[in-house]
Amino acid sequence: MDCPSEENLIRMKLDGISSIANLDFDIPNRKLTVFHSGEIDQIEKSVIELNLGGKKISTEQTDQTEFKENESQKKLLWSVLVINFAFFIIEMTTGIISKSMGLVADSLDMLADSFVYGISLFAVGGTVIKKKRIAKLAGYFQIILAIIGFVEVLRRFFGDEKLPDFSTMIIVSIFALIANGICLYILQKSKSKEEAHMKASMIFTSNDVIINLGVIIAGILVHYLSSNKPDLIIGTIVFVLVIQGAFRILKLSK
């Protein structure tokens, strides 16, 4: 390997081989150690097909099941899980108190992300097929959450709801925006960000950044229009984005 781009090329080439447990790249020495179960023929053939001058050096048995890269992934995922779950509690509490559907919807999205990161922790170190199955589970979970959200938006639209507290909407969303920006930065630091379950995590967090900006704008409109409609509209948009993100994740799981 001459550069990290070749590492990504190899990862993509070997992505469909379910017997691979871990790839350990030593770029300066142009060496790749593949931890796998089963025959090595398919792995060797796939590497040679890339025409990068690859060849098998040796094959040996190992009892190693834990990898430094996996431990690094776990630390990253635990970090974003804690941040998202903390803001789920904060936004749900302030959303109920301030009567803001936008904050309540965003808190549910944060909760969904927390579950996704938790599920992803179980995927670390697993086979590619297992990781894609978990990405699929995450996608379907988001769709179910969005349906529940739409029902709540309709209930509030036709019910007699008080005007949301716009200042709480704006302040809490600004802090949530900062938190999601930190989460996205943490996830992008991962060397395994191209794997399905890590991509799923980044998709969720990217959606959250857009949602936070939307809630801030809705809070401003609630104040100037003296209407709860902007808050309900952003609530609806949140769940549309959730569904779009879910379908993108389902594509990753194929």
Image (spheres, grey):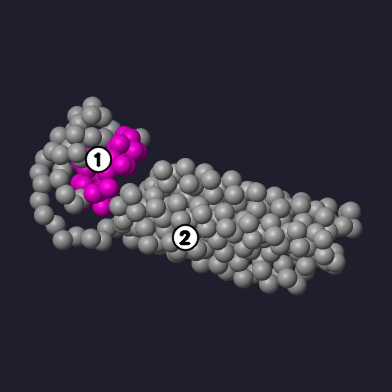
CA gap, disc 2 to disc 1?
Answer: 32 Å
Tag on residue 197? none
Left/right of residue 134 with respect to residue 215 in the rendered view: left
Q: Helix, strand or loop at disc 2?
A: helix
For mark 1, does the 10 Å Cα neighbourhood hold few (<14), some (14 to 19), or many (20 or more) residues?
few
Tell me the amino acid under the disc marked 2. Tyr
**Tags 2 and 1 touching, CB below 8 Å:** no
Q: Which residues are magenta?
A: 6-35
Residue 166 point in image, percent of width and height? 80, 61
Mark 1 residue type? Pro
Figure check: 86 above or below 246: below
**Is residue 10 left or right of 189 when viewed as pictured?**
left
Q: Is residue 115 magenta?
A: no
**Extreme top residue here?**
51
Residue 93: image x %, image y %? Answer: 68, 72
Dividing the picture into quadrants, the one containing residue 149 is: bottom right
